[in-house]
Structures are given as C-alpha cells and as structure tokens.
Image (cartoon, rainbow, N blue to C red):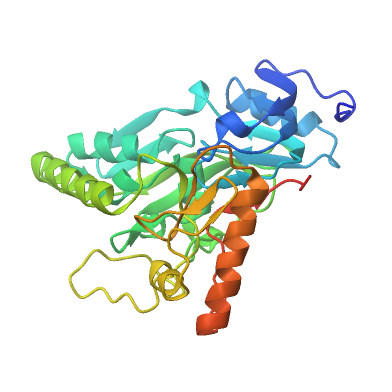
Amino acid sequence: MTHNPFPALPAPRGTLTANRPLADLTWLRVGGPADWLFQPADEADLAAFLAALDPAIPVFPMGVGSNLIVRDGGLRAVVVRLGRGFNGISIEGDRVTAGAAVLDAHVARKAAEAGLDLTFLRTIPGSIGGAVRMNAGCYGSYVADHLISVRVITRTGEARDIPADDLHLAYRSSTLPEGWVIVAANFRAEKGDPAALEARMADQIAKRDASQPTKERSAGSTFRNPAGFSSTGRADDVHDLKAWKVIDEAGMRGATLGGAQMSPMHSNFLINIGGATAADLENLGEEVRKKVFQQRGITLEWEIMRVGERL
C-alpha cells in the first residue's frame, strides 16, 4: 500500500514531487521516500511556499545528503532541497557570499583564486547550508571562525539575515530553529597568495585521500570526537580522545552488519559495502557506541544525522 502523503500543498514555481525516494540523494545511498520533495525555483518561490504551507506539516531542509542517514521508512515531511537558484558565489574585498547549495569545496577553490583563505572548507564534504548548520570544521578551523551572517527563510516564509553570533555555533552544532532554511552565508576570509592556498588545498586532499575511504559510500565522520573538537592536523595533535581511537580500542575497526561496515581504513567511517539498509548502518553504529561505552565508559555522539521512520 503506498503511503498517502499530506493533503493538497501550495503550488510552487519550482518542482514538487510526492512520495520521492531519497536514497539516491544521499551519499550512503539508503533510505525510504519523503512525503514530498520540494526544489524551489528561487528564494521568493521558497518563501511563498513556506508561507502558504500548513504549519502542522514538518519541513526538513536537505543539502547534498553527505552527512545523513534517511531511515528505511522514509520521512513524513516536506524535504526542501535547494538547487540551481541557490548556488551563486560573490566576492568583495575580504567577504565571500555563497548560496546554501554551493559545495564547500567549490567555495574554497573560488576564494583561493581570489586570494582569500577559506581552505579548511576544501575537504569538507557537502554544501554550505549544511556546513553552517553543523559548524563544520577541520584542521583547527571552523565555520564559526569566518561566518559573518546567514540569510534564512523561516518556517513561516519570512526572509531574515541573522548575525553569526545569534546561531550560537559550537562543535558540530547551531541553534537554528527546525524548519528554517538557510539560503546563503556570508564569510570573512584572510588574504593569502592564490598559489600557496592552492598548494595547501592539494596537500590537504592528498592527506585526506591517504587516510580516509573517500572512494567508498560513506557519510564522512560517523561520531563526534569525544575530545569535543576536530583534528587539528598539527604534529602535536593528540589522539587519546579521537573517535577512531576509542572505536579501535573497542575492537570495532572493520566490523560489519549486513551491508554496513566500519571502514578498515578509518574506523570512524561507516560505509555501505553493498546492499546496506539504513537499519544496517544505524544498528552497526549503535553496536559501536555500546562497545565503546563498555570499554571506555565514553558515550559516542552521532555526527551523522539520522532522520525519518524505521520500517
């Protein structure tokens, strides 16, 4: 029996698809359908749609699905996925403004060409909207260090510019209200030599590819570091409270469940080795959390977002 999505929705100029499977829109390639997938034409289309949408209907903004497990039962919500109307980048002085749908890596490269240093974004999978919401970071730099403000459309369809301080950005978190959609972000960047910035990014990519399973179906780091900060990449970086270290100590590197595996290459990467369900992935993650707690008394916190209903 097919799920009967919500009653009639406002008619947008963009694309609105009922009962849309989401597996192909996530990096892990798992998950059931969303009641609705909305791809707005532009900011005005998004604002008008949300203003007219029944307030009881949940709204879930989704980026490129790089940090997401959609459960097998799918999502009872309108999933908003920004596309072409939200992927502009403009640079003025030391300011970089990027649409929420732009890939982090693309912003890093464009900024570097203009002699501005947002190189930390180069190895972060995903798009700017998700990077802001999660205060993404690596090599000791975070979105919070550079963000000036974000432009959002609230759940009621109001456009607002919000100063970075009002988002209370912390390690992998922000206080952006549920259902609000980030449409653009405004960053400040230090000046740098374009060639030197390019070389640094090439070095970061090489390091990442040597230590992470970048060719596999993963969603980046599975758990937050218990230390409460990202790897700095510096020589004095300590590993005692790194997620991968405590997972190794619990004997879970390479562990499998169904089509899910903790990567043998980097044990904090949960990968779909073929035919995994969302339940396989989430259950293996929970097994890892249990083992780490038994071994070290540490409760690992998920970094991958899990949404939707179990089957």
Q: Position of residue 235 (x, y in %)?
A: 17, 71
Q: Give x and y (percent) for residue 126.
A: 44, 41
Position above or below: 142 against 184: below
* For residue 160, above or below residue 296: above
Above/below status of 39 relative to 141: above
Which residue sits at x=57%, y=78%? 293
Residue 287: x percent and y percent? 60, 65
Name the residue at 17% across, 43% down. 202
Q: Nearer the viewer, residue 294 or 109?
A: 294
- The answer to whether any part of residue 228 appears in the image is yes
Q: Is 305 rendered above or below residue 13?
A: below
The reply, left or right, for residue 80 in relation to residue 256 is right
Specify the farthest residue to the bottom.
297
Identify the residue shown where x is 86% and y is 26%.
Answer: 2
* Relative to 164, 275 lies left or right: right
Foreground of the two, 177 or 236 = 236
Place of residue 138 in the rendered image (x, y in percent of width and height, measured from the top left): 33, 58
* Residue 159 in sight here: no
Front residue of 259/101: it is 259
